[in-house]
Amino acid sequence: MQNDIQTLIPRQPVPDLTLPLVGGGEWSLTNEAPDTFSILIFYRGWHCPVCRKQLEEAEALVEQFEQKGAKLTAISVDGEDRAKEMHASAKLDKLKLAYGLTLEQARQWGLFISTSRGLTSVNVEEPIKFAEPGFFLIKPDNTLFYSSVQSAPWGRPALEPFLNTIDFIVNKNYPARGEIITLD
């Protein structure tokens, strides 16, 4: 079996993404132009109650992140209808919700892919295949600063501590870490 998961390297360019947004329009990583970071929250989809909680947390912090020069976007492989359901159920007004990520794009970002196990605890059918969670801080030049990828719904980074983390990174000119590819 071939392993086609990509590994993103800090300080290196990340794959570009352009996706539709719930509510209309299009989101593009290239066009984000944040002062500090584009923060990408890849979530499993409407079927996931853990994702809903994470997106509700993100919704409450959007303006605080914007004050730090960071732009938050949540992304999933869900189609438009399921993304609209998540948008409504999580009561998202400020958080940008992009949908239609392909499984190939998910792999380019190093995300794990899972298969359906039927209905979830919120009585929503899992898609046949979907991407597991990931969290990324992307610098304005579209290089990777930080990533966290999970193979299951649990273990995601808490968002609120990143508000102070952004200040630390900016004030100390702290570099992205983990950039060594070979051990030579």
Image: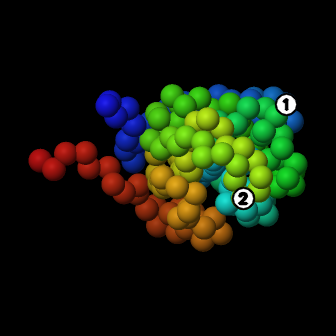
Mark 2 residue type = Ser
Q: Residue at x 16, y 50 (%)?
A: 183
Q: Compared with residue 100, is residue 145 higher up or lower down, i.e. above or below? A: below
Q: Nearer the viewer, residue 161 or 123?
A: 123
Looking at the image, which residue is at 85% across and 31% down? 24
Q: Note whether 121 is above or below 87 in the view shown.
A: below
For residue 151, side relative to residue 91 (left or right): left
Picture residue at 58% right of the left edge, 57% below the top: 153
Q: CA distance from mark 1 to mark 2?
A: 30 Å
Q: Is residue 68 above or below residue 35?
A: below
Q: Residues within 10 Å of mark 1 (few under 14, many from 20)?
A: few
Q: Closest to the observer: 77 or 147?
A: 77
Whether residue 140 is visible here, answered yes or no, is no
- Local SS, label 1: loop
Coordinates of residue 46 in the picture (x, y in percent): 74, 46
For label 2, the residue is 121
Report which quarter residue 100 is drawn in: top right
Q: Earlier in the sequence, mark 1 or mark 2?
A: 1
| Residue 84 coordinates in the image, percent (x, y) | 83, 40
Question: Would residue 126 be visible to someone looking at this image?
Answer: yes
Which residue position holds label 1? 24
